[in-house]
Image: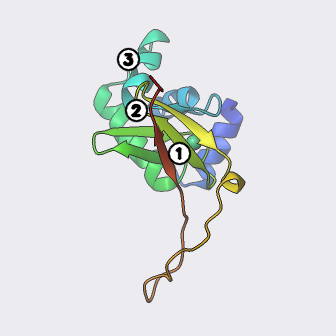
Amino acid sequence: MSRTDILALFEKHGVLPTPQRLEIAGVLLARPQHLSADQIIDRLRTAGSRVSKATVYNTLNLFGDRGIVKEVMVDPVRKFYDSTTHTHHHFYNVSTGELHDIPEDAVAFAQLPSLPDGTTEESVEVLIRVRDAD
Ligand SMILES: [Zn+2]
């Protein structure tokens, strides 16, 4: 995604374009991908960035809150930031720690419960855990 595209995305989601936010978005939104905060920090360091860890975490939280990235929790201590924000599903390989996309239309539900009173559906997304076969 170009700097112009990122600036347009920030404006659409009400995010002020600080230099640090542009750097972080430049890494994460470069292509469709899933990155952990540590992976993003590594890539920033490799590129010579001096953005602090705290700023990276705060910025990722902001991006998640504003819908610029999708947060995917694969277990209680491991979160990925997904540059693809529309509804889709995932395979998570517990052997390798890798997350892969499953297109939305590759999963169908035979039955879902009725929604609690006073709510509307936001999304239904599936995380399928796999492990490498022996
Ligand atoms: Zn994904």
In the depicted structure, whether residue 63 falls above or below residue 116: above
Residue in the foreground of this view, choosing between 88 and 84: 88
State left or right for residue 63 relative to residue 30. Answer: left
Q: Could you tell me the amino acid type at mark 1?
A: Val
User: Which residue is at 48% across, 26% downward?
Assistant: 133
In the depicted structure, whether residue 48 falls above or below residue 107: above
> Residue 74, image x and y in percent?
39, 43
Which residue corresponds to mark 1?
69
> Residue 127, image x and y in percent?
49, 49
Give the Cα distance between marks 3 and 2.
Answer: 32 Å
Q: What is the secondary structure assignment of the residue under circle 3?
A: loop
User: Which residue is at 55% across, 47% downward?
Assistant: 68
For ligand 1, the image quadrant comes to top right
Which of the labelled discs sits on residue 50, or is there none? 3
**Which one is earlier in the sequence, the residue at label 3 or at label 2?**
3
Which residue corresponds to mark 2?
94
Q: What is the secondary structure assignment of the residue under circle 2?
A: loop
